[in-house]
Image: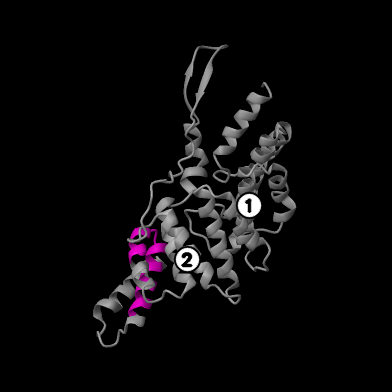
Amino acid sequence: MKNGVNLLHFTGELSHGRPAVFQPEVVAKYKYNVGVSLLFASRPNEAFEYLTEASQIMHTSPLVWLRLAECCLCVHKPGNNSDHFDFQNRRKELVIGSVGTCPNKRLILNTNTCHDSAYSTEPQSYAIPAPNLDFALLCLRNAQRLLTNKYSKLKMAVYTTSAYVNLTIGNPVEALRDCMTVTDKNCDSQLYKYLARMYMAEALLMLDRIPDAISVLNPVHFKDFDPSQEYLLSQWCPHNKFCAQTVLQYNLAVALTIRGDVEKAADLLKRVWVARGANEIPIQVISLALYIELVLGK
């Protein structure tokens, strides 16, 4: 509601204002405000157009480049709440059929429970800005070059977002470097530290540094983290402490399974299941639990 009111206010000012009042710098700021309002109203394609125009004047602002990158990310993946955390509805998709009859009945599991958008590897031209991950990375590099030490929280946001993009396009080395920048800095936001450690562990797994990934996911690093203290959009999880701990434990269980410690991973998933909320565990927990049961011969 608040973003919609802001949007009406800003567009009204532009349409009814006197042309002499609006110098290029003022128009750019208005377009930036409209773009941000559209972005937070879940209209990233429209937001991208406004922010692209604003960046032509406000090109020295790292925040503008970060917002442009966020538009690209929201076009690529609008959220993860319905895809991963809508447990009550998504669990019906785990089994897509069966063969045989009892006691020899076999279940056919769905191999496509994750609805992540595919990353296109086709060559992209930067001559015409487009809301894709390659352009997002370009925007984030611009933001990194423009950052100064006084932008503490903004700096963490830029490098955390860059880590996510690098992971998505399959560049774990750069993602790891971005994450180390976040975890090495003093930052007031526990959210960025949490995300940086999640991304760092994933990058380490991609680099086959499994013991390091398990160490990064040690719960002792996250005992005081509570995302409910941050401003979060409703379509993104984790949005509370329990949900954040569940994601952490699931990621740790994945790392343990890859290392071969399936019994430890199974115990971890059991604790997650016992303490679960209605829609606060990712659907992949069930898929991993089924895999572990098969490995253990159960």
User: 26 or 149, which lies in front?
Assistant: 149
Which numbered tag is attached to residue 270?
Answer: none
Q: Is residue 240 above or below residue 144?
A: above
Q: Is residue 48 magenta?
A: yes
Residue closer to the observer: 163 or 10 = 163
Which percent across, then down, holds residue 296? 69, 24
Q: Tell me the kind of residue under disc 1.
A: Met
**Quadrant of residue 224 within the rendered picture:** bottom right
- Placement of the C terminus among the 4 image quadrants: top right
225 lies above or below 298: below
Q: Which residue is mark 1?
A: 200
Q: CA distance from mark 2 to mark 1?
A: 20 Å
Q: Secondary structure at mark 1?
A: helix
Q: Is residue 263 left or right of residue 12?
A: right
The structure residue drawn at horizontal position 48% and vertical position 67%, both measured from the top left corner, is 142
Q: Can residue 24 be found in the magenta stretch?
A: no
The residue indicated by pointer 2 is 66
Magenta span of residues: 27-49
Q: Position of residue 144 (x, y in %)?
A: 53, 67
| Amino acid on which the number 2 mark rests in the picture | Leu
**Do we see residue 43 in this rendering?**
no
Residue 195 visible here: yes
User: What secondary structure do most residues of the magenta stretch adopt?
Assistant: helix
